[in-house]
Amino acid sequence: MILTGRVGLIALICVLPIGLSPWPRTAFIVLLALLAVVVGVDVALAASTRRLQMHRLGDTAARLGEPIDSVVVVSNPGRRPLRGWLRDAWPPSARAEPRVQAVSIGAGQSLRVKTRLRPIRRGDQQSALVTARSVGPLGLAGRQSSHRVPWQIRVLPPFLSRKHLPSRLAKLRELDGMIPVLIRGQGTEFDSLREYVIGDDVRSIDWRATARRSDVVVRTWRPERDRRVVIVLDTGRTSAGRVGVDPTAGDPSGWPRLDWSMDAALLLAALASRAGDHVDFIAHDRVPRAGVYNANRTELMAQLVEAMAPLQPALVESDAAAMVATVQRRIRRRALVVLMTDLNASALDEGLMGVLPQLSAKHHVLVAAVADPRVDVLAAGRSDAAAVYDAAAAERARNDRSAIASRLRKHGVDVVDAEPEELAPALADRYLAMKATGKL
């Protein structure tokens, strides 16, 4: 049973006759009994909420930052019409609106109740209880019960770096033979023959074809296809740090490094698949968390976002040895291994630096890291003594980051270290540069 505000208002009004009555005790008992009877009758006349039948409709997936509707279909099989409120409860990060909705359902009828969700966190959002409240015809009291109507919505990575894809595909088409490659890079493959034009590299002249045609003919080259790109996402503790600004909600605390890395990985995967390369994906901290292997090019992006969506940073130190062993066990051919991690000196010294030679001996390794733009802001501070100390600490952090990047390059590892919004295009450009020079 539930009581409405009207009961409190009536009880307050009853104070006046009790105070004016010569027998206040008797008046109090009589009025209380009368109010209890009226409330009891109102509860008895209210429609039953336990007999309500509920099921859900709607989408089960949405991208982070995009609204999605959750629809609950409520059926009233009873003989009395239901008048009251309904609440479809979701976790706070789902940002469900409105919180409570007024409903009126006739006997034997159904009603669709729509709740708009605006999730601010990626992952699986599980619905909580659906609570229905029915009030009697007097509006004094009623009934309330909660129903478990399970539903799950998977909030996918938003892939905001998609806007950079057209420009990178245009560069890829230039490398792929639509605009002739004048200089042959190591690892490129033969494409076709054409007539010599001024500006062509004379080293590309095919003398046998020239002799047959009685005209100067040159070979054209294109980057090799069917290479393998392995994207390894570090989901350890360093991926939990929030950097930048959340582009979907304007939150100054920003996204976790893990989400920025996912965004860059999606752009690289889309570009590599269009280039004809095979893309594999591994998420790992102490153990493998997710994987996509040998995916069809038409299904690659869908499988990637599904695999990435439920991933959350694990507040443990990543096991670099196990990560490298997983890559070597899964990938037999030489490949480009893109390790999405942080250039944290202590974490890399204790983990990756010791096993990196095993990986770089067989594969081409590229480390992509998200830099914190707030470090540059702190490094420029000179307003007071506290700002100077902050600037010194920020400068030391930048120096440590540069030093670890230099050490990685000495081991033959490429490094892309960029601010959150710039990481995805910088990584795509590095991939295209490797294609152009025949390193991949």
Image (cartoon, helix red, strand yellow):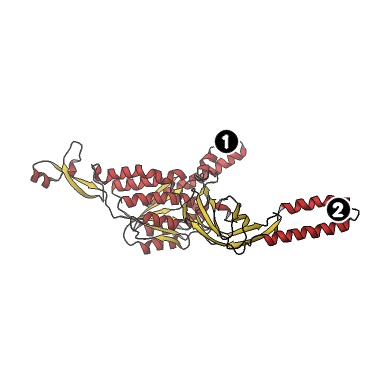
Count neighbours of disc 1 (C-alpha within 10 A) and say few if under 14, some if 14 to 19, many if 20 or more: some
Which x, y percent locates residue 301? 38, 54
Residue type, label 2: Ile
Q: Residue at x 73, y 59 (%)?
A: 39
Q: Residue furthest right?
A: 22
Which is more foreground, mark 2 or mark 1?
2
Depth check, front residue: 363 or 34 = 34
Residue type, label 1: Arg
Q: Residue at x 19, y 47 (%)?
A: 192
Q: Secondary structure at mark 1?
A: loop
Res 214 quadrant in image: top left
Q: Is residue 160 left or right of residue 86?
A: left
Res 132 quadrant in image: bottom right
Which x, y percent locates residue 378? 55, 40
Q: Which residue is mark 1?
A: 382
Q: Which residue is mark 2?
A: 18
